[in-house]
Image (spheres, grey):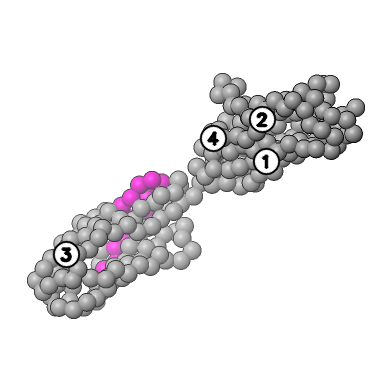
């Protein structure tokens, strides 16, 4: 008789919203052909189906991907891939079932731990330079969290070059100035997909070229994000 085996590989951990690919491999370990094979992968409730290979068809009602294989020769194999996107945090379990024409049935399972993440960055509007003495420069500084989880205790530090002085500053956090450095108070939380914006107006008191120095820190960051912009 036939001896079909099925194995499954895929990531053990995935970030929320990041696509994941899983590979189901069906092997005929017998000396005779295997006929009329059906492979069904049940998509976990915390995943969305994206795509499949080798004729796999997705049934959105049953939330299952179904492959129908006419046959697999002796000691031959088929590779069936599926791409899913995690939409819920937690451990998501997958079940794949194989049945052939003789009634042989095999199952394989896998589980993926889905975790959220924070991803905080700085977004700056373009600055017109050079700046003449007496000119004012308006800019927006955005601390954006493009992740899924909140960013905590987010702080922006701006160091001005010589010849630039603050005129007006508006934002979600007050600031203190020490020398050339403006240190904004920490913002308790920035939710995933949101940003905090600081509007800054500077005036040029001296001519020359300088660089604005920005630092961004948050509890979830291993080290400060540092950026410089010429002005």
Question: Residue 83 placed where, x, y %?
Answer: 58, 38
Residue that numbered label 4 is attached to: 50
Q: Which of disc 1 and disc 4 is earlier in sequence? A: 1
Label 2, label 4: how many angstroms apart (C-alpha)? 13 Å
Residue that numbered label 3 is attached to: 137
Residue closest to the eye, 167 or 82:
82
Q: Is residue 70 left or right of residue 52?
A: right
Question: Residue 41 placed where, x, y %?
Answer: 66, 30
Question: Residue 43 placed where, x, y %?
Answer: 61, 31
- In magenta, the rendered stretch is 182-196
Residue closest to the eye, 93 or 76:
76
Q: Which of disc 3 and disc 4 is earlier in sequence? A: 4
Label 4, label 3: how many angstroms apart (C-alpha)? 46 Å
Label 3 residue SS: strand
Residue that numbered label 1 is attached to: 23
Residue shown at 23% from the left, 70% from the top = 231
Label 3 packing within 10 angstroms: few (<14), some (14-19), many (20+) = some
Label 1 packing within 10 angstroms: few (<14), some (14-19), many (20+) = some
Label 3, label 2: how many angstroms apart (C-alpha)? 58 Å
The quadrant in which residue 26 appears is top right
Residue shown at 29% from the left, 68% from the top = 229
């Amino acid at each position: 008789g036939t001896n079909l085996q099925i194995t499954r590989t895929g990531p053990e951990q995935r970030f929320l919203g990041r696509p994941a690919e899983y590979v189901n491999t069906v092997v005929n370990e017998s000396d005779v052909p295997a006929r009329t094979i059906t492979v069904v992968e049940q998509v976990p409730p915390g995943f969305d189906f994206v795509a499949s290979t080798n004729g796999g068809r997705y049934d959105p009602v049953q939330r299952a991907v179904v492959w129908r294989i006419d046959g697999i020769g002796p000691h031959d194999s088929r590779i069936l891939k599926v791409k899913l996107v995690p939409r819920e945090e937690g451990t998501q379990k997958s079940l794949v079932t194989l049945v052939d024409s003789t009634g042989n049935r095999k199952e394989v399972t896998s589980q993926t731990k889905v975790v959220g993440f924070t991803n905080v960055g700085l977004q700056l509007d373009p600055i017109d330079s050079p700046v003449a003495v007496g000119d004012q420069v308006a800019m927006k500084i955005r601390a954006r969290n493009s992740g899924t989880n909140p960013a905590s205790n987010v702080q922006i530090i701006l160091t001005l070059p010589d010849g630039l002085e603050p005129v007006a500053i508006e934002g979600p956090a007050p600031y203190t100035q020490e020398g050339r450095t403006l240190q904004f108070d920490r913002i308790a939380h920035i939710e995933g997909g949101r940003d905090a914006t600081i509007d800054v107006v500077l005036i040029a008191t001296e001519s020359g070229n300088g660089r604005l120095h920005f630092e961004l820190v948050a509890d979830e960051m291993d080290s400060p994000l540092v950026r410089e912009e010429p002005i």
